[in-house]
């Protein structure tokens, strides 16, 4: 027998290990602090960041702001963050400030047209774009306002035009900036209204000259996206650009102009799709983030200016993690946000000499110390056409290869978005694996980071070789002795939801259950009800009534899941946001109705006040509970 003291110590050690090996739960996931870098203080001594924490009971989030020494140390909560950060919306000479305000321009409501009927609840439209993302068009537009500091009236730089800045739904303060000399305001706008707006992605950069009151289109020759303008201290402007109108997932390049000539700094690299960027403090190079080989990494590119030298691109960080945002720079140190499949975003410093990352914030360390982590593994799978496809495999905590586990095929949305080491608060691989499932997440066709050709092969082929990529991935992993081939599930949202609907009609008994969130079910009704029509125009090939368009006719015939419901043979859970106007409500209603009338076990969960995402704490908890309850029932 052990001495009493030794017995107690052994018991304590076992207890500590047991505590450290608990698995992540939906409640714990939603209580994690969400770290967001705000910038570096004006004296370059501190990193300013906020931590938002959702509260399930109140269905709201609380936020606190902190500073931490740029070289690491103890964080301090502050109340005066704005006084520590440079106000980039004040002109360099201190005479003006710029902001965005909603301005009523178009008559839309019944009372707009008939003032004697103020209680009418009516909207009247003559063109498309009558609703967008999660809002009905109300005749108000976000406009850039120039306000003199001396108290004179503000001026609408967009002069009463029916155009938006920032761009809806995702644009922010980055859509309007000062030139280096403070003589101009450059802003992003898609100067189209109604039906032309709904069928085009052509945003441009406009420069408003304060002295003359004139506006110049700086990117008129480019017909795709032009976004995110910034200036360096030399007056040179950088921005992000896609070339083709109507193609939201075109290769996104980093452009710089010195006022007379423009240079594409990333055209040389077919595999580079720039997600975000910032100028180096020296103004001679830029840092940017791009997907590569299943991760998001930090790169640097030189700007040669008027010389004949080629821009030089170098990768700064490497590893199985995501560098998801650049917060700021102080000399040879860059502050970034970093995450991986086991850890939500925290702030790190990057040594620009050697790429070494050092963790600055430790918001969720206490929670992680009590959790078992999930092993993530790179696997390369041969596709049906002989390509090597990267597949992430995420294993349950304390994985034992002698046991058998159910597996989930995860289908990524987008459709052309990278599948990297991201940490989602809904589609969370750590959470899924922690409930005892092996997660199989393929970097299938249609993902940047593997070359432009790989990314573009999905266009006009939504239900083609991409579906074979999915099946190749799950078939490969299912060969392992630790995978229970009789307990395979398929899950996904957006294009991933579409993938679940499509695979349900062609999986040949592979899957025992499906889960689809906000997925496209019927191409015809999608074309007739989605708000951004440029998406099906590009991705399907055109309108369903264009019988001479062979590409479009093939899409509607071969790739619409509604055409293959007769082959559905497995249970399906369907989630749908009630305010999702990108993939509207009737898509999920049709799918659920078809499953019910065919006698297939099915469930519909409608989140009435959510858009394409789930943003409310209690709704998110219902989502998680229904998700895992369904898997327990059917898998």
Image: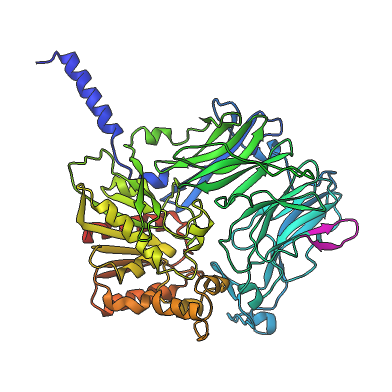
Q: Quarter of the image containing the N terminus? A: top left
Q: Position of residue 174 (x, y in %)?
A: 67, 52
Residue 208 is left or right of residue 24, and the answer is right
Q: Position of residue 16 (x, y in %)?
A: 27, 27
Q: Nearer the viewer, residue 137 or 152?
A: 137
Place residue 226 in its image quadrant. bottom right
Q: Nearer the viewer, residue 459 or 563?
A: 459
Q: Is residue 177 magenta?
A: no
Given the current orientation, which residue lies at the most extreme right position?
212
Q: Nearer the viewer, residue 625 or 277?
A: 277
Whether residue 28 is visible to the viewer of this picture, yes or no, is yes
Q: Quarter of the image containing the C terminus? A: bottom left
Is 2 located above or below residue 159 in the figure? above
What colouring does the structure picture have? rainbow
Q: Position of residue 25 (x, y in %)?
A: 32, 46
Given the current orientation, which residue lies at the most extreme left position?
1
Place residue 188 in its image quadrant. bottom right
Is 113 located above or below residue 541 in the figure? below
Q: Is residue 213 magenta?
A: yes
Is 211 located above or below residue 356 in the figure? below
Is 365 located above or below residue 31 in the figure? above
Which residue is at a point 46% across and 81% down the rendered structure image? 553
Q: Which residues are magenta?
A: 207-218
Which residue is at a point 67% across and 34% down the rendered structure image? 41
Q: Position of residue 135 (x, y in %)?
A: 56, 69
């Amino acid at each position: 027998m052990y001495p009493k003291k030794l017995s107690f110590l052994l018991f304590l050690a076992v207890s500590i290990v047991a505590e450290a090996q608990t698995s992540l739960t939906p409640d714990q996931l939603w209580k994690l602090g969400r770290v967001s870098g705000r910038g570096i203080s004006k004296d370059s001594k501190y990193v300013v960041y906020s931590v938002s924490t959702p509260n399930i009971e109140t269905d709201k989030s609380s936020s606190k702001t902190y500073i931490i020494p740029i070289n690491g140390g103890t964080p301090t909560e502050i109340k005066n963050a704005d006084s520590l950060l440079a106000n980039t919306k004040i002109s360099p000479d201190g005479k003006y400030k710029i902001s965005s305000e909603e301005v009523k321009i178009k008559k839309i409501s019944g009372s707009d047209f008939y003032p004697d009927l103020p209680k009418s609840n009516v909207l009247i439209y003559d063109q498309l774009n009558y609703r967008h993302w999660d809002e009905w068009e109300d005749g108000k537009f976000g406009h850039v306002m120039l306000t003199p500091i001396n108290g004179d009236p503000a001026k609408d730089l967009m002069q009463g035009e029916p155009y938006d800045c920032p761009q809806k739904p995702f644009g922010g303060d980055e859509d309007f900036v000062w030139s280096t000399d403070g003589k101009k305001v450059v802003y992003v706008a898609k100067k189209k209204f109604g039906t032309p707006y709904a069928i085009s992605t052509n945003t441009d950069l406009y420069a408003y000259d304060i002295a003359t009151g004139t506006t110049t289109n700086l990117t008129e020759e480019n017909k795709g996206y032009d976004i995110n303008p910034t200036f360096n201290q030399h007056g040179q402007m950088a921005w992000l650009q896609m070339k083709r109108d109507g193609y939201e997932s075109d290769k996104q390049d980093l452009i710089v102009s010195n006022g007379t000539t423009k240079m594409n700094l990333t055209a040389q690299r077919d595999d580079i799709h720039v997600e975000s960027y910032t100028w180096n403090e020296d103004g001679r190079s830029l840092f940017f983030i791009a997907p590569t080989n299943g991760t998001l990494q930090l790169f640097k590119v030189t700007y040669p200016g008027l010389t004949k030298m080629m821009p030089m691109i170098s990768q700064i960080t490497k590893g199985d993690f995501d560098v998801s945002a650049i917060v700021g720079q102080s000399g040879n140190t860059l502050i970034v946000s970093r995450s991986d499949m086991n850890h939500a975003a925290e702030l790190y410093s990057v040594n620009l000499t050697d790429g070494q990352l050092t963790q600055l914030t430790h918001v969720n360390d206490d929670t992680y110390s009590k959790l078992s982590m999930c092993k993530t593994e790179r696997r390369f799978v041969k596709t049906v056409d002989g390509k090597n496809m990267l597949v992430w495999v995420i294993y349950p905590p304390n994985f034992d290869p002698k046991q058998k586990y159910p597996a989930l095929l995860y289908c990524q949305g987008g459709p052309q978005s990278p599948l990297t080491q991201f940490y989602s608060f809904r589609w969370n691989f750590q959470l899924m694996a922690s409930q005892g499932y092996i997660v199989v997440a393929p970097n299938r066709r249609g993902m940047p980071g593997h070359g432009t050709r790989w990314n573009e092969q999905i266009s006009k082929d939504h239900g083609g070789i991409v579906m074979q990529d999915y099946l190749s991935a799950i078939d490969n992993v299912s060969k392992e002795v630790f995978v229970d081939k009789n307990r395979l599930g398929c899950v996904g949202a957006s294009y991933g939801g579409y993938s679940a609907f499509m695979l349900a009609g062609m999986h040949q008994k592979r899957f025992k259950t499906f889960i689809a969130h906000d997925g496209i079910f019927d191409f015809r009704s999608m074309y007739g009800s989605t708000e951004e029509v440029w998406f099906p125009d590009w991705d399907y090939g055109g309108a369903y009534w264009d019988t001479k368009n062979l590409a479009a006719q093939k899409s509607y015939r071969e790739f619409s899941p509604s055409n293959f419901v007769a082959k559905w043979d497995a249970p399906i859970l369907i989630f749908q946001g009630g305010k999702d106007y990108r993939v509207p409500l009737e898509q999920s209603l049709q799918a659920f109705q078809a499953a019910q009338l065919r006698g297939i076990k099915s469930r519909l969960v409608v989140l009435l006040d959510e858009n394409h995402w789930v943003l409310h704490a209690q709704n998110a908890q219902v989502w998680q509970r229904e998700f895992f309850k369904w898997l327990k029932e059917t898998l």
